[in-house]
Structures are given as structure tokens and as C-alpha cells.
Amino acid sequence: MPVSRNNLRGLATSVPFSRHLEAFLEMLAAERGVARLTLGAYRNDLVDLAGYLARRGMVLEQVPAAALHDYMAGMATRDLAPRTQARRLSALRQFFRFLVTDGLRAGDPTAGLDTPRLGRPLPKILDEAEVQRLIATAEGWPGDEGVRLRCLLEMLYATGLRVSELVTLPLAAAQRDPRFLLVRGKGGKERVVPLSVPARERITAYLACRPSFLPAGRPLRWLFPSRGKEGHLTRQRCGQLLKELALAAGLDPARLSPHVLRHAFASHLLDHGADLRSVQQMLGHADIATTQIYTHVQSERLRRLVETAHPLARRK
């Protein structure tokens, strides 16, 4: 993703432009293939630091270690989540190591910073009955919007795709072998995801009404086109549609998002005997340790089952 002077200045007008920050972001995109969303988050993190320093008369590239310690300490008082703090620290470390490698600094000021302690929150999960209720409710959704909604729902639950992967699927992805999807995930890595028979049927039904969603004079590249400036359905709109569906199904909308359906996909596969390595491959996790969170979900479910169903647990 191209990074320009206007991009950086547009984020914080009080922050002086940094050509080294621009060069760092370009390196992440070009050499490491960092995903667009991650790149945007890193840019925001570093611009936030640059603004903090500018208000104190300091320059990003020349910041002393003590100022970084103060900045990180201040994040705790701003009630930023530990994971947000950890991501910001990662952005800082990578940026200053980039400066050291390029000979722009003599030392790394982040070397003495401690990584925030992260808990291990279990992902939000819908049980199988709740997913079936969503599917049944979607059956009654009217018109072409209903056909598209059923397709989105089935594809998210049947494939475990990230919502960003789903909305940016090219039309060609649904026109190859109907048994599989070729998905381009984080860092541009491709993986093959099998499609269930219901998902294939939903795609076929959706393709028949897809022309009604085509914007006039816009290219036909995306599987889920939109009249918005991006040319495809946005992540935000997909999330809104699911929350509307949850409300109609009698579920708490706060419990449903595209990512929750991804969690349900993985958890329900493991419940029915899938092996962890296969689930890892379908989710596109680089490290199997990321996938292992779902084994903790199973363990927590079993613990609750014992506490509620075992005769000794019910004794007073």
C-alpha cells in the first residue's frame, strides 16, 4: 500500500512529517508484505507517539529512552487494552530497529521497555443451535438482500474466513473449482479452503442475483460488489448485516460478528473430531499455538459441564 506525505499528515495535522516513518511503512509493505490493516494500525501508533513527542518539543527519530518509558506508562492511564499496548510497543520496536539498521540511530531506545502482560481471553463462541437459528432466520430474509445475506453467513461459518478475506474475494474465486476457494490471507499468503455443499449452493444462488448489486460503470472484479468507493462490500457493512440478523433471530447482537462465526467454525470442527493441524491450515494461522486457543474453549466447556451435571457438583 503506497504511503504518502498526505497520508501521514492527514492522520494528525499537528504532527510534523517524518520521511523516516514514511520509509519504514513502505519497507513493511514492500519487503515484508505486511497486511493493509496492520500497516494502518502501525501508522496510527507511530503518529500517536510522534504527536506526544511534538507536544514536548521532541522529534520522533531522536527520542530518548526515558521519554518512551513515560509514553508507555501513560498508555496504562488512558485505559488502553493490554493487546493495544503490546501492538504499539511492537510498532515502536520495529521502527527504531529500522532506524538502527539504516544507521540513523546509534542505539535502540526500546530495548529496556517491558511487554505488557497479556491475559488469555477465550474467544466468543456461538453454540451450534444458535448458528442454526441464525441460518433459519436468514431463510426468511426477503429479496436479493436475503440471498446475499445467506451466502455471507454460510461462507463465514463454513470456511472460517476472516471478514477482510471474504469481502475482498474476487469473482474468479467462485468460478474456479466449486469444491474449493483459493484465499489470499495475511501477508499475501494463499491457502485452499474446502467448501461444503450448502455453501456451494448459497454461492450459486447468490451469483444469479449478483448483478443487482453491481454499481453502474464500475469493474466487476469483486464477488461481493458495492456502490461504495472501495467497490466491494465493507467489513463494517458485513458486520451490520449480521447484527441485524442476530436481532431478528432473538440473539444479542453484541455476541455476533464475522469473527465470532470464524471462532464457531473452528470450535465446532474440533468438537466433531477435526485435528488441530487441519483447522490451523483452514484458518490460515502461521503458528499452531494461535489455533490452540480453541482447545482451551473445549476445556472450559467441559469444566462447566462437570460443575453443572456431575452428581457431586449438585450436592449442597
Image: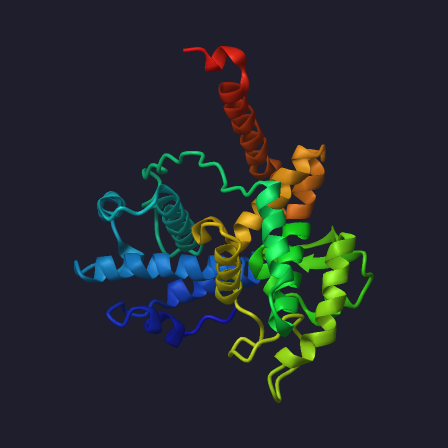
The image shows residue 148 at horizontal and vertical percentages of 64, 68
Would you say residue 145 is visible in this rendering? yes
Q: In this view of the protein, which residue sits in the foreground, 182 or 22? A: 182
Instruction: State which quadrant residue 55 falls in.
Output: bottom left
Seen from the viewer's position, the closer of residues 254 and 91 is 254
In the rendered view, would you say 126 is above or below 233? above
At x 66%, y 68%, the residue is: 147
Q: Residue at x 57, y 76 (%)?
A: 226
Count of numbered circles on the image: 0
In the foreground, 110 or 216: 216
The residue sitting at the bottom extreme is: 217
Residue 285 in sight from this viewpoint: no
Image quadrant where one finds the C terminus = top left
Q: Residue at x 63, y 54 (%)?
A: 135
303, above or below 286, in the image: above
Q: Quarter-wise, where is residue 62 in the image?
A: bottom left
The image's colour scheme reads: rainbow
Q: In terms of depth relative to the viewer, which is nearer, 115 or 94?
A: 115
Q: Position of residue 260 (x, y in %)?
A: 53, 48
Q: Is residue 200 left or right of residue 60?
A: right
Q: On the rendered structure, is 142 left or right of 239?
A: right
144 lies left or right of 14: right
Up-down: is 178 above or below 4? Answer: above
Q: Position of residue 119 (x, y in %)?
A: 40, 34
- What residue appears at the point 34 percent right and 67 percent down from the top-left corner? 18
Percent across and percent down for residue 259 are 53, 51
Q: Return the residue found at the far left.
A: 56
Up the image or down, 5 lies above or below 141; here it is below
